[in-house]
Amino acid sequence: MKELKERIVRDGKVLSDTVLKVDAFLNHQVDPQLTMKIGQAFAEIFRGERVSRVLTVEASGIHFAMATAYALGVPFVYAKKKKAVTLSDEVYSVPVHSFTRQETYQISIAKPYLSSHDRVLIVDDFLATGAALVGLATIVKEAGAHLVGVGTVIEKSFQEGRGLLEQMGVRVESLARIKSMQPGAIQFIEPVSA
Ligand code: G4P
Ligand code: NA
Ligand code: NA
């Protein structure tokens, strides 16, 4: 997505070889026009798939899931993150280990909001190590639903997330794929103009 890549180049800040700060428009201050266009882009990519629900994880996936679900005319559900394991029959729940934060938390979705009849599209802001997205994909499987694919706004292609999801047989579509980055320079897999 050309406009997204231009915006990343203009307003993103590469803090290190692995961390891209996009607080100005994506996950702290949010540009609603760009967010809606991102939702439309995901909706177009997955249009033929008869998606019945969009899933994400709180917090910074929520507005993209909202925009995508709005464009598709379906509901979205965001998994909740909890520190402690609260065992319950009423929720689907899996542990997620965050490598960045060096901690494990639970993500969970109440059973009434995901069923075996669903055709699910997962949406999130970043694809990095993929831990949270693998966790969500695991919940979709546990529910017996069909996972149509994962859409991420920014993929750091040099990290392992895409590989882990593809190993699970999941289709991955990212609107901006970063091959490598250093402070002041970002290389995309596809040129900014594409
Ligand atoms: P993940 O791949 O499962 O998301 O886990 P990881 O441990 O790699 O990332 C931890 C958190 O940092 C995630 O947010 C992820 O979206 C975010 N993140 C990963 N790489 C970058 C980056 O280059 N820039 C920015 N700005 N964020 C990044 P989270 O803590 O799970 O959720 P949220 O509350 O922020 O949504
Ligand atoms: Na996120
Ligand atoms: Na995040």
Image: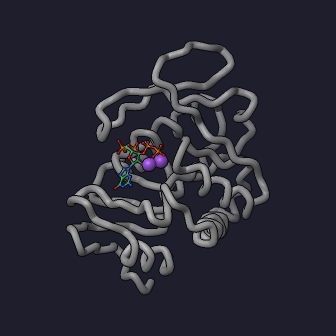
Residue 167, how many percent across, how many down? 39, 45
Q: Residue at x 73, y 56 (%)?
A: 50
The quadrant in which the C terminus is found is bottom left
Which corner quadrant of the image does residue 116 belong to?
A: top right
Q: Nearer the viewer, residue 82 or 160?
A: 82
Q: Residue at x 63, y 72 (%)?
A: 33
Colour scheme shown:
one colour
* 147 over 110 or under it: above or below: below
Q: What is the residue that sits farthest to the right in this orientation?
A: 73
* 82 over 187 or under it: above or below: above
Q: Residue at x 29, y 53 (%)?
A: 159
Residue 155, how many percent across, how many down? 39, 60
Which corner quadrant of the image does residue 45 belong to?
A: bottom right
Residue 131, how many percent across, how many down? 40, 39
Q: Residue at x 68, y 19 (%)?
A: 90
Residue 3, how many percent across, how many down? 50, 79
Left or right: 186 as drawn, with respect to 9: left
Q: What is the residue that sits farthest to the bottom in this orientation?
A: 193
Total marks in image: 0
Q: Nearer the viewer, residue 22 or 95?
A: 22
Left or right: 180 as drawn, with respect to 73: left
